[in-house]
Amino acid sequence: MLHNFNSGPSILPQVVLQQAAEAVINYNNSGLSLLELGHRTNAFQEILNEAKDAVKKLMEMNDEYEVLFLHGGATTQFMQVPMNLLDTQATAAYCDNGIWGNKAYKEAKHFGQVAVVSDGSTDKYHSIHKNFTVPSDAAYLHITSNNTVEGTQWHSYPTTSIPLIADMSSDIFSRPTAFNQCDLIYAGAQKNMGAAGVNLVVVKKDLLGKISRPIPTIMNYQKHIEAGSLMNTPPVFAVYVSMLTLRWILQEGGLEEMGRRNAAKSSLLYNTIESLPIYTAPVAKEDRSQMNAVFFLNDAALEEPFLALCKQEGMIGVKGYRTVGGVRVSMYNAMPLESVKVFCELMQFFAQQKG
Amino acid sequence: MLHNFNSGPSILPQVVLQQAAEAVINYNNSGLSLLELGHRTNAFQEILNEAKDAVKKLMEMNDEYEVLFLHGGATTQFMQVPMNLLDTQATAAYCDNGIWGNKAYKEAKHFGQVAVVSDGSTDKYHSIHKNFTVPSDAAYLHITSNNTVEGTQWHSYPTTSIPLIADMSSDIFSRPTAFNQCDLIYAGAQKNMGAAGVNLVVVKKDLLGKISRPIPTIMNYQKHIEAGSLMNTPPVFAVYVSMLTLRWILQEGGLEEMGRRNAAKSSLLYNTIESLPIYTAPVAKEDRSQMNAVFFLNDAALEEPFLALCKQEGMIGVKGYRTVGGVRVSMYNAMPLESVKVFCELMQFFAQQKG
């Protein structure tokens, strides 16, 4: 029995995997594989429509917003956001709360001016810096809603008079969220929303068409809206897996239920860390991520045997990110509470042995 | 029984679909789905290595070239090629031999100067214009090796003293090809090489690093080479399907065998068109595509009943592209000769009925 704590690509619901595999052989009894299906067919249009509708329903978004499924991952959006929204002479505000926000603002510098309004590196990214000032004439404020690597999460979004843009790659649809506080949301699919190879972008339409620099067609949100996410051949299979995953979230009870489950899993894990003195969670309590819990063994020499025990017991993907070290446990929507229980039992067993 | 003549996404080998479906449930008996597998695991590295090695072997490319698998499709490359290779003041030469080459040169204009050296629209794209002059100081010459929509194909590439760049999306690996005449080759995977959502780019390394404009990281070929196609989470599933398809090509006998099969299929089809006076193939004989055959019914009123008969007999995807009309039959590598035989019998049957 394996327990998949991978940080992404990561665990997906079994029913999604089953249906995706069936579609690769014979899509919906069409006699064709999903991979052989034209993207301008009614069959694919239905898949795309269901995926878009599910996003709007889960986000409770009105028609001021448009839902796009685009090629690539969040790293593509690091470029595409400023390419569409940041004029050469204008300034964009970025929160640097971790490795991904850091990469995001560096890409924005290719297109305009950047003001890094909060710098989490001053305390090793162990908290979300929430006290900062945003230039009132900035084109937008960019945040990373959950920091996969550092294990921090925005539990409520900053209030600002300028457009708010959120990279939600690693906590989208994990709980009820103030989506409508944001003007643009993006997320690579390969954590809570499907397989790698597709990007979700939800954008408020009045944000677009305001910059003077010409935008290459394939990067232009406005052109993608006009083409209904079908400007070129989309990543058909990845869009389908996202649709199945979104359908699963709705069937399981939506964001309320996801939030209940994710709170239960992360509470159990953080309580276990707190209760056992050989482990330490470095992140400020109020900023801890429900998706990715980071902790250390106080005696660094115990890290290797701990990770070896995890491997032996079928706990996959728990080694901390290379720049952070320690242990990282990712508990996305599809992760059952049972797997976190088994992991916590292993932590207790190890603590008893070595404590 | 269906016969899948889709122009892309299109028919794939049954063994590839079977193995891809199995991997979605349980990759290589790992106990995990391929979709749940981290992209920095040995398992994925092996997939990527096998795919790259297969490309180098099929292309007979030496180490001056690098093989990349990137997000997106050929339309992404319309932007990425000039972004990497065309300085603002420099000129790139483009052959406009069809809808895709036309789109390609328009994107290049976002980055530098463009010289359209051949304009196929003057004879409705019914031939490949091969007599043209390329400015000797142009940064590169861009061609589309096969025109999916118009049904033309370069049967030998232009000789030029400047770097040659080829969009091979719709005929890559269909026969022995002078790949080493090109300095950069790209192809969306969803025709002869797998599923939608991944791009193959093969680039001669000494072509890179020569422009002065900074390149956004995710679009920078040089950075992708340094990161070994793992700059960000790649489209794991689509890369895997490409690897399986490339493995299948090698197992079936490589490009010699693909070329033999594709010549047999396209000869049968074009000979059938020529032998029946109710049909006309508009493309110049010497430029006809082995992948996509375009023809018309001389009596336009017969087009609708012909397409209706095709549909009734399970012939999928044969309606001509909306800008061209008529009939288009796509016969990629995975298409069996048997399907083309059945289609030709239908053409004969229809001609007898209506002739």
Image (spheres, coloured by chain):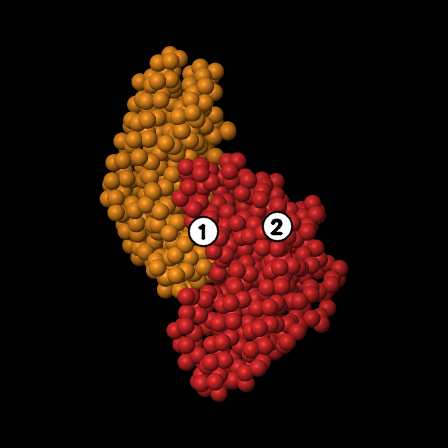
Chain colours: A red, B orange
Spot the residue most to the bottom.
A355
Residue B116 visible in this rendered orientation of the protein: no
Give the CA separation, mark 1 to mark 2.
Answer: 22 Å
Q: Determine which quarter of the picture holds residue A179.
A: bottom right
Q: Residues within 10 Å of mark 1 (few under 14, many from 20)?
A: some
Which labelled disc corresponds to residue A55?
2
Q: Is residue A354 visible?
A: yes
SS of the residue under disc 2: helix
Tag 1 residue? A18
Mark 1 falls within which chain?
A
Q: Residues within 10 Å of mark 2 (few under 14, many from 20)?
A: many
| Labels 1, 2: one chain | yes
Against A10, is A340 above or below? Answer: below
Q: Where is residue A223 in the image (x, y as percent from the top left)?
A: 60, 43
- For the point 65% across and 53% down, which residue is it? A59
**Residue A238, x across and y down, in percent:** 49, 50
**What type is the residue that disc 1 sits on?**
Gln
- Give the camera-side residue of B232 and B97: B232
Q: Nearer the viewer, mark 1 or mark 2?
A: 1
Q: Quadrant of the C terminus of chain B?
A: top left
What is the x, y in percent for residue A50?
Answer: 58, 44
- Residue A277 in the figure: left or right of residue B7: right
Q: Mark 2 lies on which chain?
A: A
- The residue under label 2 is which amino acid type? Val
Residue at x-position 48% and y-position 15%: B301
